[in-house]
Image: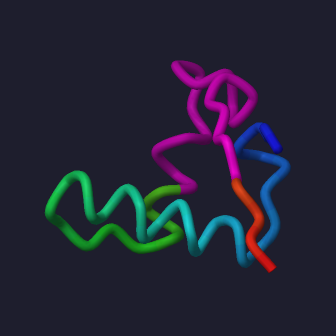
């Protein structure tokens, strides 16, 4: 499933946090990530897409 950042639910945002922090070798908080993606550069969350693979 492909979703815009602004349409992610809480569990999905936590997964994005784990992924981004593993890539960047840092520990950004969820509010920091939301603040980063909620800017004009990312069209306020519409301009960044995530492919989420749901495994149940």
Q: Quadrant of residue 54?
A: bottom right
Quadrant (top left/top right/bottom left/bottom right) for the N terminus: top right
Compared across the picture, whether 25 is left or right of 28 comes to left
Describe the colour scheme in one phrase.
Answer: rainbow
Quadrant (top left/top right/bottom left/bottom right) for the C terminus: bottom right
Image x and y of residue 24, in percent: 20, 53
Residue at the image point whose x is 67% and y is 42% from the top: 51
Q: Quadrant of residue 46?
A: top right
- In the rendered image, residue 46 lying in the magenta stretch gets the answer yes
Residue found at the far front of this picture: 56
Compared across the picture, whether 28 is left or right of 13 comes to left
Above or below, 39 against 50 in this view is: above
Image x and y of residue 11, in percent: 72, 77
Residue at the image point whose x is 52% and y is 68% from the top: 31
Residue at the image point whose x is 37% and y is 56% from the top: 20
Above or below, 54 against 4 in this view is: below
Which residues are the magenta region? 34-52
Q: Front-most of 36 and 14?
A: 14
Q: Front-most of 34 and 19?
A: 19
């Amino acid at each position: 499933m492909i979703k815009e950042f602004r349409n992610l639910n809480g569990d999905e945002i936590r997964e994005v946090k784990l992924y981004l922090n593993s890539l960047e070798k840092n520990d950004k908080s969820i509010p920091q990530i939301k603040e980063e993606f909620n800017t004009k550069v990312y069209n306020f969350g519409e301009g960044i897409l995530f492919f989420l693979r749901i495994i149940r």
